[in-house]
Amino acid sequence: MKATLIHGPGDIRVERVPDPELRASTDAIVRVTHSCICGSDLWPYRGIDLSSGDEGPKRIGHEFLGVVEETGSEVNSPRPGDVVVAPFTFSDGDCVFCREGLPTSCVNGGGWGADGVDGAQGEAVRVPWAEGTLVTLPADGDDELNASLLTLSDVFSTGHHAAVSASVGLGSTVLVIGDGAVGLSGVLAADRLGAEQVIIMGRHPRRTELARRFGATEVVAERGPEGVERVRELTGGQGASSVLECVGTAESLATAVDAVRAGGAIGRVGAPVYENIPQPGRTFLKNVTISGGVAPARHYIPKLLPDVLEGRIRPGQVFDRTLGLDEIAEGYRAMHEREALKVLVRP
């Protein structure tokens, strides 16, 4: 079969690899119908934070919908022929962390494209712990619905995690830092949870227009101290009660700390490329909660799925380009150069 491999910074190739085979009675083989490129895939593409330092090309991609082709003897559900969505990590569904709603810390879990597990940007994937990992979907989704269902794999679940971690609720004043796909998903998640005011910090008109469709009430184009000052003006001088940090840089987290009100909360979900959380004394004195991390997408998918299926939210609008698998290198280039927000890939 064909699959995407990253050979080094800027070097994405589609190559022939062995077809996946069942290795355990808890495995499934899924034929991929929809995948995509994540903002976090751009870190190794840019030469930053390459996974474990292993030599040689690596499989890549961690978001996919597909059709179950084969299952191991211990897999009762899903069954062959079922349409499924996979969260961006696999998990057994039964360990202490899975039962507590934190499948990203599953004692038997892991990530796609590492340690001999297939990456999602290919024609098929072997899914370990299929019964605990995969979520069965209706089989008759159209293109628009399938795009939204695919976001549950990672990007919308991550935006939702940012909102939950920042304690967004009815009447909240929310600041979203970052106008990438995760930030836009955070806007939609905050609106879904009942926020009264949702401010997005971003300066790309096409993205901020989508943010307004998702529920943003104001857009702040300024950055740094000027951006913080503008946020305070919009929030009556107090700052935002909930800040969603969706970038992952030291500068964006510093902005979050400066813009949050006393007693507020910061939900950080941007893959961090910083080593320290800024201003510990200030956050201590202001009673600011800093939470977040890797989104437990498998825990969230059943909760978010009904709103997607019934059309109450359409997070698939974050996809602004669709390419075939053979064109995926162009998708990486387009996202890296900000010509595309998020690229959907059809193997």
Image (cartoon, grey):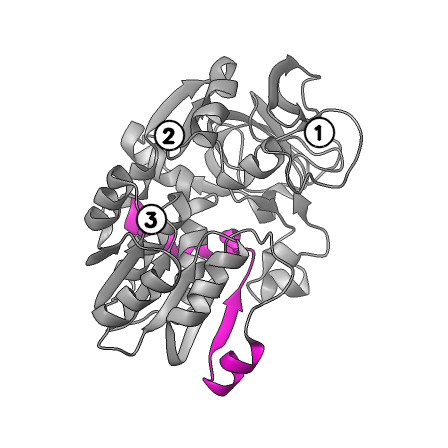
Indicate the amino acid at tag 1. Leu
Q: Is the residue under label 3 in contact with that under label 2 (CB below 8 Å)?
A: no
Secondary structure type for disc 1 = loop
Indicate the amino acid at tag 2. Ala
User: Tag 2 or tag 1, which sits nearer the N-term?
Assistant: 1
Range of the magenta residues? 280-308
Residue 43 is one of the magenta-drawn residues = no
Task: Tell how many labels.
Answer: 3
Q: Nearer the viewer, mark 1 or mark 2?
A: 2
- Left or right, 88 with respect to 343, comes to right
Could you tell me residue 233's position as x and y percent? 23, 71
Could you tell me residue 140's position as x and y percent? 32, 30
Indicate the amino acid at tag 3. Leu
**Above-or-below relation of 23 to 26:** above
The residue indicated by pointer 2 is 340
**Above-or-below relation of 259 to 338:** below
Find the distance from the CA under tag 1 to the CA under tag 2: 36 Å
Secondary structure type for disc 2 = loop
Q: Is the residue under label 1 in contact with that under label 3 (CB below 8 Å)?
A: no
The residue indicated by pointer 1 is 22
Residue 305: in sight, yes or no? Answer: no
